[in-house]
Amino acid sequence: MSDTVTSETVIEVSGLGKQFVKDAVGIVALRDFDLTIAQGSFVTVLGRSGCGKSTMLNLLAGLTTPTSGTVSYRGRPVAGPRTEVGYLTQSDTLMPWRSVHKNVELPLEIAGVPAQRRTEHAAELIGKVGLEGFERHYPRELSGGMRRRVSLARMLAGDPETLLMDEPFGALDAQLRGELQAELLRLWADGGQTVVFVTHDIEEALLLGDRVVVLGPVGRIVLDRPIDLPRPRDADELRIDPEFVALHRELTAALREGAR
């Protein structure tokens, strides 16, 4: 990871709650949720479906407003999306009428970056995610894993300092998921961004994170634990590492506790 990383707080969440109304009935998605994220950290948020993980990310991103509590980014209240924060959702949000290059260019275009600089930066990012030669292809011509790579490059195009990621590799097969996990870790190590990565997969949480937060129903934090496994981490080697096995058991137990 970058030597410039400090322990400065980037995201601070206090007493966060979110309630939705469906058929005139209030549904609580998140209640009294507290979380602090340090600059440069890679935090994996682990939980079963329906525990409020995606709701939490939407609130951190400023896409929805809380029913109660506060979200602060570098000490300032989050009132909407911020250019410093990139968000990679579960679903494919590429624009089908734009090529790979044009999709990656989009945040730069919106920001008013001159055409030549847009072209150069997009080409650099396409190379970083291993898609050289596919610049003129359209999303329909790409595999699911390649579309994820384009989405990752597009998120990075705006040069965000914080990345929010909602189970971005969950729909991919094991081999592709492993490749993109390694790619993400390489990009994080090179850029020193802060990452909040939501997953329901224990192995993924341990492979990626330097801290794992386990959520129970409505965002109750069951476990908040630093992960000291040495980097770089190889999935095959980790599976037989006694420390990894012990951590896996601990997180499994936390998930079971959260389900009660």
Image (cartoon, helix red, strand yellow):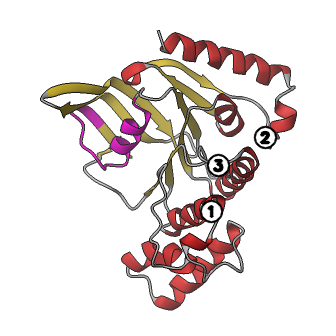
Query: Can residue 23 be seen?
Result: yes
Q: Is residue 75 visible?
A: no
The question of residue 112 being in magenta is answered with no
Task: Give the residue at x 68% y 28%.
Answer: 227
Q: Quadrant of residue 66?
A: top left
Q: Is the residue marked by circle 3 packed among few (<14), some (14-19), or many (20+) residues within 10 Å? A: some
Element carrying mark 1:
helix
Disc with the residue nearer the chain's start (2 vs 1): 1
The kind of residue tagged 3 is Leu
- Residue 149 tag number: 1
Please provide percent x and percent y for residue 214: 53, 23
Q: Nearer the viewer, mark 3 or mark 1?
A: 3
Q: Which mark is residue 231?
A: 2
The amino acid type, in three-letter code, at marker 2 is Arg
Q: With respect to residue 219, does 77 lie above or below? A: below
The residue that appears at 72% across and 52% down in the rendered structure is 176
Q: Which residues are magenta?
A: 52-70
Residue 241, image quadrant: top right
Determine contact: label 2, label 3, CB under 8 Å: no
Q: Label 2 vs label 1: CA separation?
A: 23 Å
Residue denoted by label 3: 172
